[in-house]
Amino acid sequence: MNWTRKDLIAIEDLQPEEIVHVLDTALTFEEVGQRDVKKVPALRGKTQVNLFIEPSTRTRTSFELAAHRLSADVVNITPTASSITKGETLKDTALNLQALHADIIVIRHSSAGAAKFLADRLNVSVINAGDGAHEHPTQALLDAFTIRQKKGRIAGLNVTILGDILYSRVARSNIHLLTKLGARVTLAGPSTLVPRVFEQLGCRVCYDIEEAIADADVINLLRIQHERQRQTMFPSIGEYAAIFGLTKERFARTKPDALIMHPGPINRGVEIDSDLADCKRSVILQQVSHGLAVRMAVLYLCAGAQPAEEAA
Amino acid sequence: MNNLTIRGGRVIDPANQVDAVRDVFVRDGKIAAEPVADAPVVEAKGLVVTPGLIDLHVHLREPGRGDKETIETGTRCAAFGGFTSVVCMPNTSPAADNTGTIAFIKQRAAAVGCVNVLPAGAITKNLEGTELAPIGSLKRAGVVAITDDGRCVQNNEIMRRALEYAKMFELPLMDHCQDNNLVSDGVMHEGYWSHLLGMKGWPSIGEEIIVARNIMLAELTDWHVHCQHLSSAGSVRLVREAKKRGVKISAEACPHHFTLTDKSCKGYDTNFKMSPPLREPRDVEAILEGLADGTIEVICSDHAPHCAFEKEVEFDKAPFGILGLETELALSLMALVHKKLLTLPQLIGKFTTGPARLLRLNKGTLSVGADADITVMDPAREWVYDVNQTSSKSRNTPFHGWQLKGKAVTTIVGGRVVWPVQRACVG
């Protein structure tokens, strides 16, 4: 497989074999993380800018560590530190970063299309770390990496994504990735947050949580995104927890080997019972670890010059 | 002075049910019955001669945003596009909610405008939807209609009183139909593509519910509401049904709404962002049907210039709107006449008798004695739209590089050739 992309903007753009190639590459980087010296020189001399116009801890830290482990130099730009709060346009911010000879820009932005906007205008590698409600490709890749590691495959599995689908970039990237690799995707949650139009993306839409998770091999829970909500999408967090929360009783009726996943941050007692988040079948923290390997793979493939074998 | 003979063209004058090869004569800026000796000749053999086209929905941005467009540059776009009269929207800065701003617009138009500029006044003060603007004084200052275009009066009581009051002055009311609660911060049509792209939806119902409201208020007050830029199939159906009952309701459509769909937003190109938004193929079909069966009697551009730096941003942060005056005629000819949904005279009616009747203008006709506003066009001329050649100060068009068919060849205002420009200078 010959990787030719300088940018990673959307899973929708990728061919199935490209997805598999990222996952395979991540496998080699996972091994790096278990060494005493957790560092390879793959991106030595390269400069990575984490342009996070929207707050993020987990994803930014993960990208930062991934860059360090690849020996890149990293600069973080946070929402308050960015000139965008002083009225600078995204285009000007980006051109300034390019003028400073950044090699990689990892962008998190509240507007859908922001990563593509940069990629269309810059010569540097642009990695989408989440653009509005559009896509969060590295999250879907690390979810797939986790599923593949736990289940040995993705094709043929039943994956249920539960929660706020409408405003979720994680859901969109997961839907594209899972359907491309042959999984069956069920979406569930309040009808206002899970419109039927998602059936046109090849998903099953279900408003009964018990039915939605009955045959699931993987249950991927999404946080309710208060910050993106219009006011009237459901009555209250309490009602959401009562009707759609993953409780112990509900989970007890699923397949015995069903996995619980969550991209974080989790809201204990809302979308998931607190004990379930910590139970053996929850792989939430492993997802975080895998995120590092997957992001190393993505950075390496998009910005590194050498073939994969030399890196690890 | 301002005498002309337009010779040998196919004259289409829907107001007089004329469609015949003949000469048109101009004496002192008015249409005349007889030729004037030694009048300059505009050769129109093989071309179509129509009353000057009227666009009742443009944004000239003056006063206040001369960096986007001015009365001078906007009217040059109009002349290029074959339009001899434009109705400019009141969402200027300051808003055209006062007689001083109207006087300023008329003064600038007289000084630098190359086509007729007919100002629309605001319905409410500063377009805020809370207090009525001085509608009677605006009428006296010369507005041809009132509208809060760009915004929509949300308060039904205020809308009702505006209609009752405007009726006294026989001023038509034009409404940008948009329910702010339903539309909220939507940036593109709510449907498959908005969900795929992760962008907030501007749903069809956000327009339709206001069209329905306007129909009910038009019926109650027995006064005219003109629904601006219909974009959805449901809106077309509502207007069609209301017209059958004789309600004083009318509607307009813009070329982008009957030539493009929401799929165009796929690349996050903000030149496809306008309000109301591009919708689905079935909506495009419905608008074409509405134009064909007379439900929609006016075609307009909603010419909405924005600076490049304003448009070259994230999709959800960009202002709504695109240029339209220069491409409007060609796109309409292509979508309607060349595809045989409308005859050429029917299409010309959408640009002449349609708006003239609505605004009670003594224009849109080649009757003897009328203002000699005349458009000479070649409906079959093929050309490529190059926005870098535009007269506009802005460049925000989705039609750059399009192969078009149909072009205004000569635009005449009050007997003076204003397009092509070279001839305007000597005329």
Image (cartoon, grey):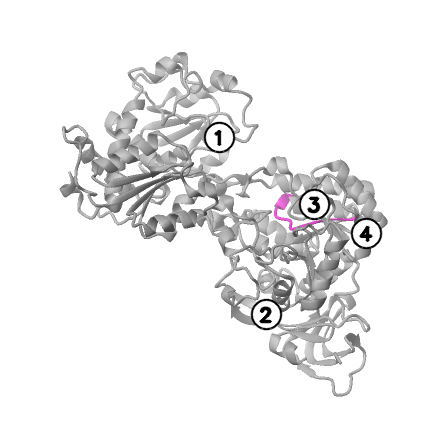
Which secondary structure, mark 2?
Answer: strand
- Given the image, what chain letter belongs to the residue carrying mark 4? B
Q: Is residue B233 magenta?
A: yes
> Residue B149, how many percent across, how many down?
67, 48
Q: Amino acid at mark 3?
A: Asn
Name which of mark 2 and mark 4 comes first in the sequence.
Answer: 4
- Residue A130 falls in which quadrant of the image? top left
Q: Quadrant of residue A148?
A: top left
Identify the residue at horizontal 58%, vertical 37% (top origin): B184
Q: CA distance from mark 2 to mark 3?
A: 38 Å
Of tags 3 and 1, the one toward the viewer is 3
As drawn, B226 above or below A11 = below
SS for callout 4: helix
Judged from the image, the secondary structure of the residue bearing numbered disc 3 is helix
Give the left or right position of residue B403, taking residue B70 as reference: left
Residue sitting nearer the eye, A309 or A1: A309
Q: Residue furthest bottom?
A: B38
In-image side of A62 versus A195 (left or right): left
Both labels 2 and 4 in a single chain: yes
Q: Are marks 2 and 3 on the same chain?
A: yes
List the residue tagged with mark 2. B407
The quadrant the C terminus of chain A occupies is: top left
Give the Cα distance between marks 2 and 4. 39 Å
Which residue does the numbered mark 1 point to in the structure image?
A227
Front position among marks 1 and 2: 1
Q: Which residue is mark 4?
A: B137
A54 or B208: nearer the viewer: A54
- Kind of element beneath mark 1: helix
Q: For mark 3, what is the residue? A: B126
Q: Is residue B289 magenta?
A: no
Q: Tell me the magenta residue range.
A: B224-234
Name the amino acid, label 4: Ser
